[in-house]
Image (cartoon, helix red, strand yellow):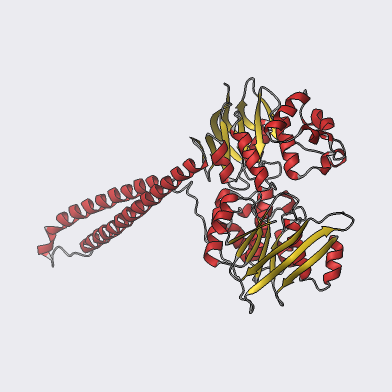
Amino acid sequence: MSRIDVSNLTFYYEGSSDHIFEQVSFSIDTDWKLGFLGRNGKGKTTFLKLLLGRYEYRGSIIHAGVRFDYFPYEIQAEQMECCGAELLEHMKADCELWRVCCELERLCMDAEVLYRPFGTLSQGERTRVMLAVLFSGTHDFLLIDEPTNHLDQASRETVKAYLAGKKGYILVSHDRDLLDACVDHVLVLNRQTIEIQNGNFSSWWENKRRKDAFSQMENEKHQKEIGKLKAASARSRQWADRSERSKIGVDPVKEQNLVGRRPYIGMKTKKMQSRVRQMERRIDREIEAKEGLLKDVEQIADLKLMPMKHHKDCLIRVREYGLSYEGTSGPVFDGLCFTVHQGERVFLCGENGCGKSSLIHAVLADRAPDRQEAFRKLGLVERGILETASGLVISYVNQDTSFLKGSLREFCRDRGLEESLFCAVLRQLDLERTQFTKPMEDYSEGQKKKVLLAASLMTPAHLYLWDEPLNYIDVFSRMQIEKLLLACRPTMLVVEHDVRFRETVATKVVEL
């Protein structure tokens, strides 16, 4: 057992005045299965890279005898033609093939996958190969960053069971199901503080809810007390001022009966002024006690959506439908039948590569001015019937964010969005104002996905097509979106592998 001691850590990116970490101190144990939580852009991946020595920082990170390794490994484009066995040394120095094969067996994979070109592997296969390499060492403390992004449900279950049987790692994830199954401690980047707690995500979340509720209650109590004290102080100050003014202009010859009262009035005024000062000190103490009560309370704003009503009840009809790619021998899927009616939230499920995103693209192509040309550009060949309602307005969230470049202003102009309202929605999704002036290529993946989600929320539509909208999105925003969809009940066709999100939101599930 070893410890990692962080003391007075301060870090910010060159050219930026925003401190990612400022005078941060905490300690963690290398035997822990540590879940790492926080809002998008709070510095989770940055901290992992600080442990790896990628950046310079102030303060100290002491980890005597601890060797780190990081997931995912960076595979260059030119290496995609190499087989996995050839890439082992690149991924992990002194990696032993037999150990990797043992780990692959635990991940329910045959070792033959190591002898296929890495670029031909599915996302789930690549993830499992990388995890097998990662855990093939014997003395490493492992830094695992979002291992379930883009994975289908079956692959997620495999990874979940695998990680649950391991120890000695930090797991950055927003997948609540994964965190509950795999971690025994949580490290949380709150709004202003960092906390470490024993337990999994659900136990931490329950504690946080209770703590936030208590803080809210205490804040309300302090606000009421401050209000009462301010009112009493104002009344006392007014009385003291009136008393003091009553002494001014008294003629001791004409108003002999008042002369004897002047010392009395002065004494009473002095006492009242002293009382005012005491009340002001009490107000200051109450304000001081109130400060910090809400510093880590998550104020989850209510989002808005503008779904449009279509004149038809059925918006999508699919009958004995199949898709294949030009030049391939077999279909991606075939014989698919389902409908999407107004108010339904239909989730597409199935293994990676079964055609979920292809079906989303087919729906978009069906609405193109030149339908045949749209399918040709996609390289898709269809069979059966795919019908979408006439005049259907679609709001689409792409799973890919790599095209986001330039400023938010340019993005709004290109999409016909009102910039101030768009930024307001981003603030509701907890994107910091300091990010508004930065180019989008400098955003984290979670921040980029929030840009796409905000644009979709601001777009009135009959149908919302969301393709893996929650990849990289923080836990709080996921809950925020769940609440929105349950309240507004838009018509949706969604590809998303987050189990809890699907169970909460879906009205229908279609298996491909």
Q: Quadrant of the N terminus?
A: top right
Residue reaching furthest to the left: 257
Q: Nearer the viewer, residue 456 or 240?
A: 456
Farthest residue to the right: give it.
327
Q: Residue at x 66, y 52 (%)?
A: 447
Q: Residue 451: tell me if it is visible.
A: yes
Q: Residue sitting at 75 percent across and 34 percent down?
A: 110
243 versus 271 height, above or below: below
> Quarter holding the C terminus?
bottom right
Residue 28 x, y percent position in the rendering: 55, 29
Above/below status of 301 relative to 178? below
Q: Residue 67's x, y, as percent?
A: 67, 24
Q: Nearer the viewer, residue 15 or 339?
A: 339
Q: Does residue 293 appear in the picture of this structure?
A: no
Image quadrant assignment for residue 13: top right
Q: Is residue 62 above or below residue 503?
A: above
